[in-house]
Amino acid sequence: MSDLVSYAVTDGVAHLELNRPEVSNAVDLPTAHALDAAIEAADNDDAVRAVLLTGAGKRFCAGGDVASMVASDSDQAAYLLELAGALDGALQRLTAMEKPVVGAVQGAVAGAGLGVMLSCDLVVAAPDTKFVIAYPGVGLTPDCGVSWLLPRAIGQQRALHLALTNKPIGSDVALDWGLVTELGDTSRASTLAASLAAGPVFAHGQARRLIRGSFEADRAAVGQDEAETIARAVATDDAQRLLAAFTNR
C-alpha cells in the first residue's frame, strides 16, 4: 500500500488507517488514490472478513485538503473535480463491498470526512469528537456523497441545519441523532471488527448490501432480492454450522 493509507490484515480484519496526522488526515489526490487501492485490496482478499477504518493522530479526518486545492491555483475547479471524483469513487467502492465495515473516529470529523465515516456500517466515536460539515466555512458545497448520506443518517432537517449553520455538534448529539453507533475508543472498534470477522461473512456482507441498497429500490424488488439472497445464504458453511448449533441446543 501507500504511507498515506496504512494497510494490515490480522485475524480476518483489514485495518485501513488514514495516515496524514500532521494535516488532520485531510485528503489530497494521492491520498484518495491510496485509499481506493487499500479498499480494493481488502475487497479482493478472501482472507478479509471485516474492515476497520481509522485515522491516525488526534483527528479522524478534516475532509478535503484545502491547502492542496489552493496550491492548484492554475485550475482549482479542475483539481477539485478530480479530487472529489477520486475520493467519491473510493467511498463508493467501500459502500459496495460485501464485507462489514467498522469506523473509529476521534477529535474531529469534517467535510468529506463525514462521507468517509458514513460509508462505514458501525461507527465508534471518542467522547470528545466534534462533527462539522465545514464546507460553508470555505465557500464550498458538499461532495463525496455527503448530501446523500447525511440526511439518510440523521434526517433532512438536521442535515440542513448542519449544512447551513456550519455549527459543530458533539459526540453525545451525534449519538442521539444516529450519526454514530456508539461512544468508545479504537479498542472498542477493534473488538467490534474482530467480532464481525468471526461471524458469518456472507450474511453480514449481504445484510449490508441489502440495507444500503434499499434506498434505491422499491419494496417489491427488495423483497425479491431478500428471498433470493436468503436462499443463497442457507447453503453457506457458516449458515449450516449455525443452523445445526441452533437446532441441537
Image (cartoon, rainbow, N blue to C red):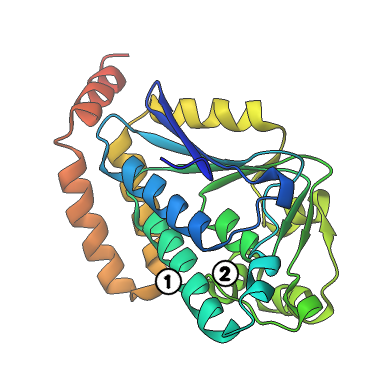
CA–CA distance in space, label 1 to label 2: 9 Å
Please state, as top left, top right, bottom left or bottom right, where the N terminus lies in the image. Answer: top left
- Judged from this view, the residue extending furthest toward the front is 74
All told, the count of numbered labels is 2
Q: Quadrant of residue 140?
A: bottom right
User: Which residue is denoted by mark 1 in the rendering?
Assistant: 215
Crowd class of label 1 (few under 14; some 14 to 19; many from 20; radius 10 Å): few
Q: Earlier in the sequence, mark 1 or mark 2?
A: 2
In contact (CB < 8 Å): disc 1 and disc 2: yes
User: Which residue is denoted by mark 2 in the rendering?
Assistant: 152
Q: Which sits in the foreground, 221 or 246?
A: 221
Residue sitting at x 57%, y 69%:
152
Which amino acid lies under the numbered mark 2 shown in the image of this protein?
Arg
Place of residue 196 in the rendered image (x, y in percent of width and height, measured from the top left): 44, 31
Give the SS element for disc 2: helix
Place of residue 167 in the rendered image (x, y in percent of width and height, measured from the top left): 85, 70
Place of residue 131 in the rendered image (x, y in percent of width and height, measured from the top left): 76, 58
Place of residue 234 in the rendered image (x, y in percent of width and height, measured from the top left): 18, 38
